[in-house]
Image (tube, rainbow, N blue to C red):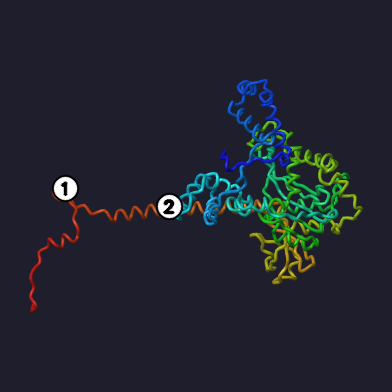
């Protein structure tokens, strides 16, 4: 260390740490100061360089005990100033995407400094400037606005003040493989509705089908209506139904259901799962406390089919876990069991007038149609009822259950007219999903037929074009020689004719 950057301080201004360091060094050289040992013996005994021992002795003789304190640089804490433009260049290079290495930034900064006539910065100087950049600035530059918002945005923590004020709903594909009746093992979808205030589960449903509007309606039906199990008391219509932007939640059907039930639909910010943290935490609880102990839990792939549960057995175990464990165990955030917290307010849940009215709202989809002379045409089917004879030519509203297309309900405004029956489907139940599959299958068959006929026609036309381009072969002296009509005309004799002929 250069002596011009060092200074000795009096003992009175030394810090406690510096005094401790001075006393420690004096303890090392004390035998030499008292004349009981030589510097070489002290160096060997303490395993330190001999030059260090001699330097400490000289410092003690010249400045006393304060001279043994660790010397500090006079320019400590100060940095060699770089041109402001060069510092901005270094920061701009470090903020590029993808993130460059500091060595690359240093080389580029040295090139810029050389062209501008500035002194080239050292590697440590560039390193210090890059490391002093704001982490939020680096995250926004390198990872984008979404990562920045997840890490640095100021959050508003939403809290419900009473039971049934806010319900959350979501779906997840479970890491559990279960048996199917007519297919290979598969992972079921779990749809859940929980009360935001108490964290109690209002309804759930398991299915092998991907989330849809009808799946959401079935879960909402179970959540709203009174349960058959006495220990499952959560019910009623929530004031707010909080979901993500899934197509099943943003459907027109659910929008109309919310209007009829006076239930506000609120959607979380798109692409931001942090807004649904409570229901995401419930999914993690299910995964950690239930699924990991069941046969078939294997996120990596399908296990041995012999040990798998059926969907009905797994549903009963999930219901038992929710009612007997989750609802009765104190929640880590609220401090109360979800069931106790939900019922603590002593309120009366708001319920529809009847289960039939609730089914009419949730499980049937309204569509506008015109009554024709031969009935109502819908989804390629024809529905008839004698009551519709008085409404031929008028617009009506039909409601249908996508799981059963044999019957529709006909309304005019709020007035119920009749139940129209499809004669082709009378006596059997066919789901809309099956009808759509059959239509797609027939459409694929017809398209295959068209493609086959097209290939045959193309092959014949291609063969015909090829025969026209091949030159005609004419036998001459038993040898095929190509001739053309133009060549025949050139070989024919040409007679000179006069104008007066």
Residue furthest bottom as drawn: 500
Left or right: 94 as drawn, with respect to 364: left
Please state the horizontal and vertical placement of residue 195, each as a whole percent of the image: 81, 51
Q: Which residue is mark 1?
A: 479
Choose between 451 and 325: the one closer to the eye: 325
Please state the horizontal and vertical placement of residue 260, each as a whole percent of the image: 79, 63
Left or right: 59 as drawn, with respect to 241: left
Residue at the image point whose x is 55% and y is 44% from the top:
124
Decide: is 13 above or below 31. below
Mark 2 secondary-structure assignment: helix
Mark 1 secondary-structure assignment: strand
Residue at the image point whose x is 43% and y is 52% from the top:
455
Crowding around mark 2 (Cα neighbors within 10 Å: few <14, some 14 to 19, many 20+) is few
Q: What is the quadrant of the C terminus in the image?
A: bottom left
**Which mark, by number, is residue 312?**
none
Decide: is 158 above or below 372. above
Crowding around mark 1 (Cα neighbors within 10 Å: few <14, some 14 to 19, many 20+) is few
Residue contact at pointers 2 and 1, CB within 8 angstroms: no
Choose between 17 and 31: the one closer to the eye: 31
Please state the horizontal and vertical placement of residue 383, each as a whole percent of the image: 70, 61
Residue at the image point whose x is 73% and y is 68% from the top:
396
Q: CA distance from mark 2 to mark 1?
A: 38 Å
Q: Which residue is mark 2?
A: 455
Choose between 434 and 185: the one closer to the eye: 185
Q: Which is more N-terminal, label 1 or label 2? A: 2
């Amino acid at each position: 260390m250069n002596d011009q950057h060092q200074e000795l301080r009096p003992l009175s201004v030394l810090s406690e740490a510096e005094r401790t360091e001075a006393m420690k060094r004096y303890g090392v050289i004390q035998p030499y100061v008292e004349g009981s040992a030589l510097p070489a013996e002290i160096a060997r005994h303490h395993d330190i360089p001999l030059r260090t021992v001699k330097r400490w002795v000289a410092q003690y003789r010249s400045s006393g005990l304060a001279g043994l304190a660790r010397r500090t640089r006079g320019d400590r804490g100060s940095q060699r100033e770089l041109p402001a433009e060069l510092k901005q260049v270094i920061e701009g290079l470090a903020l590029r995407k993808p993130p460059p290495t500091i060595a690359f930034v240093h080389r580029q900064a040295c090139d810029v400094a050389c062209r501008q006539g500035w002194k080239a910065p050292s590697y440590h100087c560039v390193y210090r400037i890059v490391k002093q950049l704001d982490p939020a600035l680096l995250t926004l530059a390198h990872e984008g606005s979404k990562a920045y918002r997840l890490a640095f945005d100021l959050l508003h923590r939403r809290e419900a003040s009473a039971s049934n004020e806010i319900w959350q709903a979501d779906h997840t594909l479970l890491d559990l493989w279960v048996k199917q009746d007519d297919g290979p093992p598969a992972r079921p979808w779990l749809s859940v509705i929980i009360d935001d205030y108490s964290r109690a589960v209002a309804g759930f449903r398991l299915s092998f089908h991907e989330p849809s509007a009808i799946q959401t309606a079935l879960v909402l039906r179970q959540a709203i209506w009174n349960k058959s199990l006495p220990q499952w008391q959560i019910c009623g219509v929530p004031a707010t139904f909080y979901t993500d932007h899934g197509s099943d939640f943003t459907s027109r059907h659910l929008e109309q259901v919310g209007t009829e039930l006076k239930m506000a639909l609120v959607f979380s910010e798109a692409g931001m799962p942090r807004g649904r943290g409570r229901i995401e935490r419930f999914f993690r609880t299910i995964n950690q406390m239930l699924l990991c102990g069941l046969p078939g839990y294997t996120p990596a792939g399908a296990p041995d089919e012999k040990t798998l549960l059926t969907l009905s057995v797994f549903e009963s175990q999930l219901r038992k876990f929710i009612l007997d464990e989750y609802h009765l165990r104190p929640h880590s955030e609220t401090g109360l069991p979800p069931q106790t917290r939900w019922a603590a307010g002593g309120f009366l849940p708001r319920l529809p007038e009847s289960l039939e009215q609730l089914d009419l709202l949730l499980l049937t989809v309204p569509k506008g149609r015109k009554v024709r002379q031969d009935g109502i045409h819908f989804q390629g089917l024809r529905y008839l009822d004698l009551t519709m004879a008085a409404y031929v030519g008028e617009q009506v509203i039909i409601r249908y259950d996508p799981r059963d297309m044999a019957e529709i309900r006909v309304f005019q405004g709020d007035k119920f007219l009749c139940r129209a029956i499809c004669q082709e489907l009378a006596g059997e139940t066919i789901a809309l999903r099956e009808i759509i599959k059959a239509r797609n299958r027939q459409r694929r068959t017809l398209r295959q037929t068209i493609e086959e006929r097209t290939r045959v026609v193309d092959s014949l036309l291609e063969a015909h074009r090829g025969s026209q381009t091949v030159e005609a072969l004419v036998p001459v002296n038993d040898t095929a020689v190509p001739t053309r009509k133009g060549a025949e005309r050139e070989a024919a004799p040409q007679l000179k004719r006069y104008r007066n002929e």
